[in-house]
Image (cartoon, grey):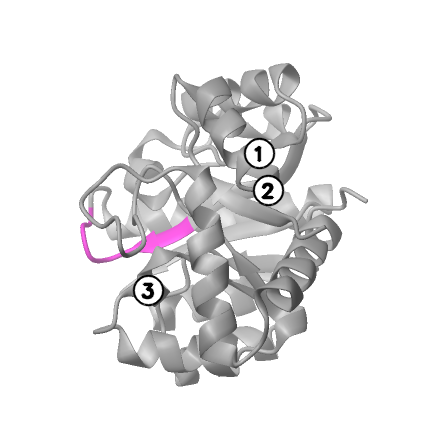
Amino acid sequence: MIEWFDNHCHLSENAEEEILKARKALVAGFINVGTDFETSSEAIEKAKMLPDVWATAGVHPHEARKGIEGIEDLLEDSNVVAVGEAGLDYHYDHSPREDQKKVFAEQIEMANKSELPLVIHTREAWEDTFKILDSEGVPKSIVFHCFTGGTTEAKECLERGAYLSFSGIITFKKSESLREAASECPLDRAMIETDSPYLTPAPFRGKKNEPANVVLVGQELAYLQGKSPEEIASATTQNALDFYGLR
């Protein structure tokens, strides 16, 4: 039976309802991502309550000004399967760039120390992202969530052993360079996500996103790669299970 896996979402207060709807769409697993100490703690609590839901613990670049206090302790919880999301966001600069760089480097160190995968967020900051990764030591397992680069950035990521996680943005026809990168991504290095409640895929743009829509992302990736949805579902689900050490 075809099964999908949403490897990056931010479940709402209506998490049970979202999960139930997604299960009906044959979504079998969910990584609920933390963006600071509070949301990481909440993600852990949801993972304890809901089957086939796992948590990450980390500090998003938007929240880097808060620092990483308490995050390392959260990594000891058995429901936490990755560090992050961590990285750099120079589009919004909600936190000073020096804070972003410092907190990103600290979380790379955490991932290396804990031997957990690292979930990376990068926006308009490719050069510094690669520079910090290389200087701190690329963790054994990394994924560029909501990958938005082109073929050049994809090549740089893949050379570092990374997975690329594609979101609803690949359904946007104007995202030509991203769609090209998605079409060429090796299937054993691809994952899919919703990043819900953000980045709702076509044809539902403008509405709140939810994990059930990961199916639309997977179907678009199948179209771009000239493969069947079944093949994409099987590969990306297995990749997620392997990446997060779930089976």
Q: Would you place residue 56 above or below residue 241 in this image?
A: above
Secondary structure beneath dot 1 equals helix
Dividing the image into 4 quarters, which one contains the C terminus?
top right
- Residue at 54% across, 45% down: 6
Q: Would you place residue 206 above or below residue 57 in this image?
A: below
Q: Position of residue 213 (x, y in %)?
A: 42, 46
- Residue at 52% across, 81% down: 226
* 140 vs 209, nearest the viewer: 209
Q: Which residue is mark 3?
A: 171
Q: Which residues are magenta?
A: 87-93
> Mark 2 packing: few (<14 Cα in 10 Å), some, or many (20+)?
some
> Mark 3 packing: few (<14 Cα in 10 Å), some, or many (20+)?
many
Secondary structure beneath dot 2 equals loop
Q: Position of residue 190 (x, y in %)?
A: 58, 66
- Residue at 45% across, 77% down: 224
Mark 2 vs 1: CB contact within 8 A = yes
| Badge count | 3
Examine the rendering and report whether any part of residue 27 can be seen.
Answer: yes
Residue 29: image quadrant is: top right
* 226 vs 167, nearest the viewer: 226
- Residue at 36% across, 70% down: 126
Q: Which residue is mark 1?
A: 23
